[in-house]
Amino acid sequence: MNINIIKRKESELTHYLREKGLRLTQQRKQIIAYFFSKYKHYSVEELYEEIKPQIAGIGLATVYRTMQLLVEAGLALQRRFKDNITRYEPVHKNHHDHMICLGCGEIIEFGNKKIEAMQEEVAKRHKFVPVSHTLQLYGYCAKCMAKQRRGKREK
Amino acid sequence: MNINIIKRKESELTHYLREKGLRLTQQRKQIIAYFFSKYKHYSVEELYEEIKPQIAGIGLATVYRTMQLLVEAGLALQRRFKDNITRYEPVHKNHHDHMICLGCGEIIEFGNKKIEAMQEEVAKRHKFVPVSHTLQLYGYCAKCMAKQRRGKREK
DNA sequence: AATGATATTGATATTCATTTTCAATAAAAT
DNA sequence: ATTTTATTGAAAATGAATATCAATATCATT
């Protein structure tokens, strides 16, 4: 399971590092092991707090630097939503967009080919050549809606 | 033309201010006069630089505060794109999204009902109740594409 | 028009996420 | 084992935005 993913990621990173004349450090190993063992949209601060007890003496700057490195190596994607905090997610197969719950902060990924196709169309209409896009829906997830309904009933 | 828009905006702001026990100052008047005379997605810094020569002694903080005030009063919308700088646009009729040119920074507005409808659909499928959304396309505008083509030919 | 209460201003300090600096340390090539 | 230099952690610096505060301006009241 996870252990294999982690090994593969470590080897992917190793290739990148070698190519660039960079080094595979203990810190980098441990950060990616942790990051790829979860599937979350981590901010550096969150990741740092969770990792600190596991990696003695790790510095916040190192986590910042390592996450940037993962982006450069193509192993992670950088996202930034309304809260203005940079988050990182493991790269996985397809492009997707995000729904962000205003209640609990959960981030839900979704992909929709039709929407993408329509974006292309709109762009073409404006003679605009799209390179990338981001689409975010802000609202309330199923859990939070249920909680809200329960709250109202109790009044 | 513009003068009428400005007067209307000033009166709208006046209503809001009165309602809240706030005051219509010279600075506020002059900032909205300038802001609504252009149609641009201004950052505070940009607006400040342009306004400074016109309004003697105006402070940066005042521009920040006034733009926030315009948002609260419903006269401006706050936007933030990839460059992580808050921008303000005059409120006008419909909801729309943005294409941002990576070449010249131009911001092009577009609206598309079909895309919106599909977003609703996707959300429903996830039992997610959307409140708002943002969609940005990053790429190259027609002008920049033409410039690029010219550049290549000259080589 | 003068007065008084207080909202607003400009300058500056502060915040917060992130980046940079720098001396000490560790990776990896020889 | 030695040498080169990339990397680290701690702390300082950055940059956009916000908060603080004494001086000033607005505006309702006299």
Image: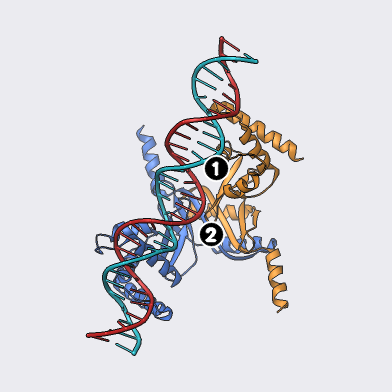
Chain colours: A blue, B orange, C cyan, D red
Image position of D1 with respect to C7: above or below: below
Direction from residue B106 to residue C21 in the image, left or right: left
Q: Which mark is residue A134?
A: 2
Name the quadrant containing residue A66.
bottom left
Question: Are there few (<14), some (14-19), or many (20+) residues within 10 Å of tag 2?
Answer: some
Residue B95 seen:
no
x and y percentages locating residue A10 in the rendered image: 34, 75
Q: Amino acid at mark 1?
A: Tyr
Q: Position of residue B55 (x, y in %)?
A: 65, 39
The residues tagged by marks 1 and 2 sit, at their Cα atoms, a distance apart of 27 Å
Q: Residues within 10 Å of mark 1 (few under 14, many from 20)?
A: some
Query: Residue under circle 1?
Result: B64
Q: Where's the N terminus of chain A, which quadrant?
A: bottom left
Q: Position of residue C26 (x, y in %)?
A: 27, 74
The circle on residue B112 is none
**Residue D15 versus residue A3 in the image, above or below:** above
Going by the numbered disc 2, the residue's amino acid type is Thr
- Mark 1 secondary-structure assignment: helix
- Taking the spot 65% from the left edge, 53% from the top edge, the residue there is B109
